[in-house]
Image (spheres, rainbow, N blue to C red):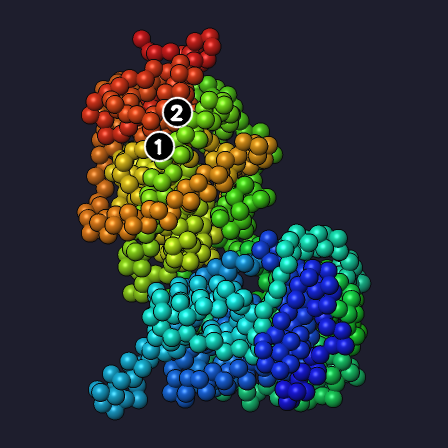
Amino acid sequence: MSERAARKETANVVWSGSWVAERLGVELVGDSKPDGDRELRDLLGLALRRNPKRAHLLVSNVLGKHVPQKPSVVYGVGFELGRRVRELLGDAGARRAVVLGYAETATGLGHAVADGLGVAPYLHSTRRPVEGVERAGGFEESHSHATSHLLLPEDPNLLAGECGPADADTDADAAADTDACADAPLVLVDDEFSTGNTVLNTIRALHERYPRSRYVVVALVDMRSPADHGRLTEFAAEIGARVDLVTRSSGTVTLPEGVLEKGRALVAAHEGAGSAGPRAAVEQGRRPYTRVDLQWPAGVPDGGRHGFTPAHRAALEPILPAMAARIAASLGDARRVLILGFEELMYAPLRLGTALEDHTDAEVRYSTTTRSPVLAVDDPGYAIRSRLVFPAHDNPADGPGDRYAYNVAGAGFDAVVVTVDSTADTPELHAPDGLLAQLAAHTDHVLLAVVPSYVPPDLPSYVFERQEPSMLPEPLRGPAFSSYAPDEVGWLLQDLSDTELEAPTEEREEAIQSGGAHYAESLPVEYQPSAQYQSLFEAALDLSAARVARAVGTVTETVLAELPHSRKRGGTPSARPVLVSLARAGTPVGVLMRRWARHRHGLDLPHYAVSIVRGRGIDANALRWLAAHHDPADVVFVDGWTGKGAITRELSAALAEFDGFNPEIAVLADPGGCVRTYGTREDFLIPSACLNSTVSGLISRTVLRSDLVGPDDFHGAKFYRELAGTDVSGHFLDTVADHFDEVVDAVDAEVKELLAADRAPTWEGWAAVERISEEYGIHDVNLVKPGVGETTRVLLRRVPWKILAKRGAGADLEHIRLLAEQRGVPVEEVDELPYTCVGLIHPKYTRGATGADGKAVESK
């Protein structure tokens, strides 16, 4: 079909973006060439979705995802882009190229681009972990509703561009071939290039692991703002590589003030209207579909999840007509037919559709189901006229949930050919409210074609024994859980906010010391600071914010500098770090490290918070989730500070049972000399240690109790929504981050010095704790809490006995002295203390060990 005919096919009498444009003031402006505006509107419509960053959705008319389109048009657009890439690279460059498409929207487009190149292997990212398949990397898509992308090639050298000189006649030829393969261009394909963040972050992550000199970015539309246009050139110069951009069309989206708020209001007002109504239930005893045996060729992958080579393409092409004929024979007298693909499975149904167009006189259209929730409005000026909602049916790693098919209901299809892989041919697909039953309510004839899910043979066993995906829920995020922004941290915890867990401090202490309870089985009553104490916090923050910012920069730069060289898998340097903070003290530090990486380097580092409990270990289910979504070698555990190193030892012991994770912790302050990666080894006041939940996203300390946390659950925590009026979590983060620019030079100098220094742990703090424990007759190191942060915790959560303060310590201890005075705890100044202060918990506590007013009394 000619481009002019394709344009006529996709054009609407009413532009399918006019409804949104009129109500939100959103405008699509094409490039300066003739008919630029019209070409852009022919390609794109507009819809609305629930998204905190972008209310509007650009809906492609030629992608085959949300809008049913002729398969030949969808395939032809991608194929033509691939031809343009081949012209750009030349035949030699095309033979060395590797094409990478993005899940889920661009998997079919990327495959068509690879077909256009003709000689390049293809791989697409996936959100489906596959047992037995090693990860070659992964990345996050920060603006998406589902962010984690995995790279699972069958050939571990595919992304590296490595190949053997099997056809070389001489040693010189072999060397030349090896050099050529190492310089293989990487072609990245997405449906749209808007800010460029996703693609550039992917290139950055892959460039660290598989450096190459050339990248080509391919998209249907280039919708960058003028401010974003220079980033591609700057980025290419930064990594020392050439980055080209190939698109079908270009333009910009203009957004008026307040568009997010207006969009949310429109979605709320129209939610539910335009859907296909309640989920239909198939009549009892009625089979709502006819199964078609495709006779898919053995050994040919169903798509590019594990790689699709030119040899695979050569095996598939000649068999496509026979498979299409089998479908056509089952269609009866249907005159309007939809080939409906499934999420990432876009290419197989697309090629079946192109072949079917040649085997039937019926009108054939193609689209796929999707994870993405979009508002439906039955108006010709809106891109999503209807939606079907049905349960996920491929046992997804992120657990059960709704899936969607758009513009199918009410579109007048006589037959729908549902094409899924065998992994998705599950009871949920055939359930009374499943996809097949939903379609049966809107068309006379449903066919089911199942493509065998390709599993690469003879691969090494996966290094981590993964929990069944359905057992692992997605991380909790703000504002539903915590006051942090959703992209700042994902909490691998379960929400116990409605459970009564608090107990009086004295009652908890007696139960803990008597052996009748573990400290993680209950929560202390949250300390509510007095006005005087709150003023001390503000003063401490003003005094130390720059110092904290410097420590944040130092520890983050150390992690970024060392991770690719110190963490290797199969001899290949690791990708960017995945920050995993130890909740809750480590979480503000993890958020700040993430902010530094973005501010200084433009990196969006994944960040999660997990629970670790002294004496019980780390949350094993959280580790399973991490291993199912990221390479364990990329994980960097983060904490606020070290005391005597008990948690450091706990983590090391716990991870001995889990392959791939590095047990080292990166901390802001390491006064105990317990770790190698730190921002400073000085014991100073970190303001986040002054308070509890109100400086930690309103999240409690973590809870581990057998009646609340089952074998398939994350550890628990509470979200204290009622304390929002006194929450200073964001204020703390913003105040520290405001000092990032002023400490850059100091950080760079400090990191250079640290990287060249011997940073081996000295465990000086542990030795001091053992000495203090014996000297003061305590005989239990767990009751000795060294450092400003740990001493603050003693005063806020436990029953303190006395405080040891380093003689001459000044402003860092003002809040300690105030708390000690409020609780009647003596402060004893001592010499030769490696910490600024040490808190001692009452060594033989019962409620009788306090006076009538509940204040601590000294032992006799």
Query: x, y percentage for residue 307?
Result: 46, 75
**Residue occupying the point 47% across, 67% down:** 199
Give the residue type at disc 1.
Leu
- Which is nearer the N-term, disc 2 or disc 1? 1
* Residue 242 falls left or right of residue 190: left
Q: Dot 2 lies on which element?
A: helix
- Residue at disc 1, secondary structure: loop
Q: Is residue 237 left or right of residue 673?
A: right
Residue 740, x across and y down, in percent:
38, 47
Q: Quadrant of residue 417?
A: bottom right
Residue that badge 2 annotates: 815
Q: Which residue position holds label 1?
A: 685
Disc 2 and disc 1 in contact, CB within 8 angstroms: yes
**Left/right of residue 689 with respect to residue 294 in the rendered view:** left
Label 2 to label 1: alpha-carbon separation: 9 Å
The answer to whether 799 is drawn above or below residue 451 in the figure is above
| Residue sitting farthest toward the bottom | 169
